[in-house]
Image: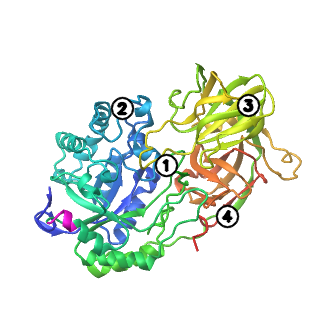
């Protein structure tokens, strides 16, 4: 057994000064069969520690649940860190931000409007208590004091940027200590204004988050904490992307120089991100500071280790810097080789509105338009249905986040939150269907915890519509829809596929020799989600910047594989491509 402690100037491992050289890997953004590879490559860069958040909403998609299988097996992830001879830092929130849906907070928690958010409100604390009771055993049993890798645990996350409820922070401290945590606890905040003090307690080690001006930021941290080790708990070496913008990159040499300054000062570091991974499925978050900006599927983050797990120029620049201060392993990870390239055409397709009964059961509401929370549906798509007697102007108080409007099955138009659109003209009466996409819940700021769907009142020429059916759509068994699909025009005649209408689900088959990384390119397609053998790879959108979706090797089987594409609008082609390398879009010039 070993000990890890906060000393007067240093971290102390078994009583000796120790520098934490950590890198962030989110286990929930990486296929579990690839965890060991990513952890190994962290050590090869010279790191001695791996840090991860814990997403409450992913582990607890419903009240009373705590899932720990597959991609959510935190215990196995920590065991693999230990097997690599590394240490671990756990950051369980309960709020994590991380550009993750709702910042990791479960959407079901806020069905009760009286529940507080990141405060000492009793309803919120009761839910947090239940989460930590389920989570803590996996962490406590793997503390360094018990022969495991865990050396530190974070309390909340950049809380000083949100609030200053000291009773709330103290409750979290008492909670984890009562659950058996004996490793050091810490807070992290931006070194600006009152954030460091607002987000911490005297008994917590204060750490800072920044990506530049390292010497200045560390000096600010030292003013707030005269003794104890200095640590940058998030060294931002890249950034995330939003739909409709450029792909963010940071200069590798400049980032390495900042890292060099940080290490030369004697500080410890957690590189955010070392390896970003992917926002699979509907897990991406969003930001809203006046304009709603959903995060893309890739969480590559321009990190040293790319989304698909290969070293970049930044990886080698960071490795060289670390080698100036600490020993690094001689082994060097291999760079990316070209993946298998080919094209495949969809062969059969089915209109989404024709298979709604196969995707979910409706909730009938005799009153104002419900939210998706009313239907206990917290991600993805829902269909709102009502009858309208005549044409006119359909108005919605707010769309969260994107609504495709259909009248008797014909497309009328789109209302989107990011464009501020809230009204559309209906040509006549009929069956009104609105396909609403939750594009990701806000993960930072005061809009955390907001409800989704069509926000009432929904009116037609000023008169509120009060009879609704809301149907949550469940795509977890998307392959089952293939039985209802029909051949796409042109396939049977060998003429090639000109395109598919939307919204629809289309299918294609392809062969592979076995597990292998692939990169799916959907040029000519508009917007939707893609699935490999039933696994939801995430969203694609022609507005970019992302041009390819990453398919982790374990998702590909030897022999026949199935691709399914949920296309919301329509495609100019029936073909898709598997290309040799990822394309996350153009950089800002």
Relative height, residue 355 to residue 415 (above, below): above
Confirm whether residue 84 shows in the render: no
Q: Which residue is mark 1?
A: 285
Q: Secondary structure at mark 3?
A: helix
- Which residues make up the magenta segment? 222-226
Q: CA distance from mark 1 to mark 2?
A: 21 Å
**Residue 458: quarter of image:** top right
> Label 1 neighbourhood size at 10 Å, few (<14), some (14-19), many (20+)?
many
The label shown at residue 57 is none
Instruction: Tell which circle, 1 or 2, labels the residue nearer the N-terminal end.
Output: 2
Q: Which residue is mark 2?
A: 115
Q: Nearer the viewer, mark 3 or mark 4?
A: 3
Q: CA distance from mark 1 to mark 4?
A: 31 Å
Q: Who's the residue at 42% across and 50% down the image?
A: 444
Q: Quadrant of the N terminus?
A: bottom left
Q: Which residue is mark 4?
A: 341
> Label 3 neighbourhood size at 10 Å, few (<14), some (14-19), many (20+)?
few
Q: Who's the residue at 30% across and 53% down the image?
A: 160
Q: Position of residue 502 (x, y in %)?
A: 74, 42
């Amino acid at each position: 057994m070993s000990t890890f402690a906060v000393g007067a100037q240093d971290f102390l491992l078994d009583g000796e000064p120790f520098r934490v050289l950590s890198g962030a890997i989110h286990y929930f953004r990486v296929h579990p069969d690839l965890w060991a590879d990513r952890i190994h490559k962290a050590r090869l860069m010279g790191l001695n520690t791996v840090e991860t958040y814990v997403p409450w909403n992913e582990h607890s998609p419903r009240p009373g649940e705590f899932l720990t299988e597959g991609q959510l097996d935190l215990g196995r992830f920590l065991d693999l860190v230990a097997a690599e001879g590394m240490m671990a830092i756990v950051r369980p929130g309960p709020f994590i931000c991380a550009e993750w849906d709702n910042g990791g907070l479960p959407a079901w928690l806020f069905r009760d409007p009286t529940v507080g958010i990141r405060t000492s409100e009793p309803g919120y604390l009761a839910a947090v208590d239940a989460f930590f009771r389920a989570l803590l055993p996996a962490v406590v049993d793997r503390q360094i004091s018990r022969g495991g890798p865990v050396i530190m645990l974070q309390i909340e996350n950049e809380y000083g940027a949100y609030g200053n409820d000291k009773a709330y922070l103290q409750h979290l401290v008492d909670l984890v200590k009562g659950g058996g945590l004996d490793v050091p606890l810490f807070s992290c905040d931006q070194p600006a204004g009152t954030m460091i003090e607002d987000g911490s307690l005297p008994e917590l080690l204060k750490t800072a988050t920044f990506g530049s001006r390292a010497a200045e930021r560390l000096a600010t941290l030292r003013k707030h904490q005269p003794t104890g080790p200095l640590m940058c708990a998030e060294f931002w070496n890249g950034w995330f992307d939003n739909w409709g913008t450029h792909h963010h990159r940071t200069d590798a040499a400049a980032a390495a120089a900042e890292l060099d300054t940080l290490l030369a000062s004697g500080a410890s570091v957690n590189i955010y991100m070392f390896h970003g991974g992917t926002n699979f499925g509907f897990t991406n978050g969003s930001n809203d500071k006046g304009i709603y900006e959903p995060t893309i599927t890739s969480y590559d983050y321009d990190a040293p280790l790319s989304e698909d797990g290969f070293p970049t120029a930044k990886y080698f620049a960071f490795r060289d810097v670390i080698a100036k201060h600490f020993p690094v392993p001689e082994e060097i990870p291999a760079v990316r080789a070209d993946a298998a390239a080919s094209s495949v055409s969809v062969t059969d397709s089915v209109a989404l509105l024709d298979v709604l009964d196969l995707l979910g059961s409706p909730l009938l509401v005799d009153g104002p338009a419900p939210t998706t929370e009313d239907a206990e549906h917290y991600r993805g798509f829902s269909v709102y249905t009502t009858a309208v007697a005549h044409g006119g102007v359909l108005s919605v108080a707010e769309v969260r986040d994107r609504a495709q409007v259909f009248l008797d099955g014909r497309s009328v138009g789109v209302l989107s939150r990011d464009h501020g659109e809230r009204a559309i003209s209906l040509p006549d009466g009929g069956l009104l269907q609105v396909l609403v996409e939750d594009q990701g819940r806000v993960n930072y700021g005061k809009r955390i915890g907001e409800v989704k769907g069509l926000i009432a009142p929904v009116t037609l020429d000023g008169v509120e519509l009060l009879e609704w059916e809301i149907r949550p759509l469940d795509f977890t068994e998307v392959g089952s829809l293939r039985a209802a699909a029909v051949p796409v025009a042109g396939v049977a005649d060998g003429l090639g596929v000109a395109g598919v209408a939307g919204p629809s689900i289309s299918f294609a088959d392809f062969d592979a020799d076995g597990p292998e990384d692939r990169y799916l390119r959907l040029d000519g397609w508009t917007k939707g989600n893609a699935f490999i053998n039933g696994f939801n790879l995430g969203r694609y959108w022609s507005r970019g910047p992302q041009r390819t979706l990453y398919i982790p090797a374990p998702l590909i089987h030897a022999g026949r594989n199935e691709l399914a594409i949920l296309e919301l609008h329509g495609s100019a082609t029936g073909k898709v491509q598997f290309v040799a390398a990822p394309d996350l879009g153009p950089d800002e010039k």
